[in-house]
Image (spheres, rainbow, N blue to C red):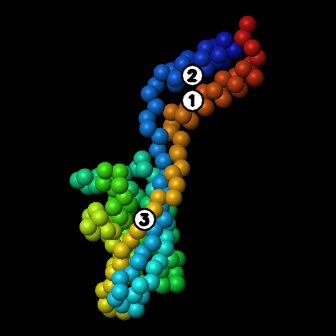
């Protein structure tokens, strides 16, 4: 490629990149949660903590709900720390941008499940098998951080600039 052609291609690429509308930037959403067990069963009035994350750009819809596959999950319960791979198809559930709960099941011992809430009247829930007796609790969520994820157009812009720099350095100035 001639130096003039390389510089022209780079200039054209950068000009097009500035004219293209950039999509909304995706973000990695990070939450902590606390499970407060109700006053029944052997775990009465005990609390357990965990955290999870998901990419807000990757979702499926189910009516008015948006379901986000969890990219990270950690939950300490009954002396064991459980991860996303320990659960059956774990998802965060949002309605109108508000987290209403998790959809996650641990099917082997100890069996437990997270369920979505229905507003302030019925908060997100947690159910577990307590030696053959069904027990439950409520879940409280707190968003702890949001990490921006670069979009492909941003990466392409930087790649084009790097290509132009390389062409200029390797082939020398045009002239």
Residue 50 vs 127, above or below: the answer is above
Q: Residue at x 27, y 69 (%)?
A: 122
Q: Residue furthest top?
A: 175
Q: Residue furthest left?
A: 63
Q: Earlier in the sequence, mark 2 or mark 1?
A: 2
Q: Residue furthest front?
A: 120
Q: Residue at x 41, y 68 (%)?
A: 140
3 vs 1, front mark: 3
Per the image, the residue denoted by label 1 is 157
Give neighbour class at mark 1: few <14, some 14-19, many 20+ (Cα, 10 Å): some
Per the image, the residue denoted by label 3 is 141
Contact? badges 2 and 1 (CB < 8 Å): yes
Disc count in the image?
A: 3
Q: Is residue 115 visible?
A: yes
Instruction: Look at the image and tell me in which quarter the N terminus lies.
Output: top right
Contact? badges 3 and 1 (CB < 8 Å): no
Q: Is residue 60 visible?
A: no
2 vs 3, front mark: 3
In the rendered structure, the answer to whether residue 106 lies left or right of residue 61 reads: right
Q: Residue at x 46, y 44 (%)?
A: 26
Q: Which mark is residue 14?
A: 2
Q: Which picture quadrant has residue 65?
A: bottom left
The residue nearer to you, when weighing 175 against 34, is 34
Give neighbour class at mark 3: few <14, some 14-19, many 20+ (Cα, 10 Å): some
Q: CA distance from mark 3 to mark 1?
A: 37 Å
Task: Give residue 35's position: percent from left, percent from top.
Answer: 42, 75
The residue nearer to you, when weighing 47 against 94, is 47
């Amino acid at each position: 490629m001639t130096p003039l052609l390389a510089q022209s291609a780079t200039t054209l690429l950068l000009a097009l990149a500035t004219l293209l509308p950039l999509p909304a930037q995706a973000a990695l959403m990070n939450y902590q949660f606390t499970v407060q067990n109700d006053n029944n069963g052997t775990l009465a009035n005990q609390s357990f903590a965990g955290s999870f994350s998901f990419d807000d750009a990757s979702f499926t819809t189910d009516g008015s709900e948006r379901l986000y596959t969890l990219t990270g999950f950690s939950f300490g319960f009954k002396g064991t720390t459980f991860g996303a791979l320990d659960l059956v198809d774990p998802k965060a559930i949002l309605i109108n941008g508000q987290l209403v709960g998790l959809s996650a099941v641990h099917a082997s011992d100890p069996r437990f499940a997270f369920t979505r809430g229905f507003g302030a009247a019925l908060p997100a829930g947690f159910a577990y098998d307590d030696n053959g007796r069904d027990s439950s609790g409520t879940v409280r969520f707190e968003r702890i951080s949001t990490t921006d994820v670069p979009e492909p157009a941003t990466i392409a812009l930087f790649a084009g600039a790097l290509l132009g720099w390389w062409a200029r350095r390797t082939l020398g100035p045009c002239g």
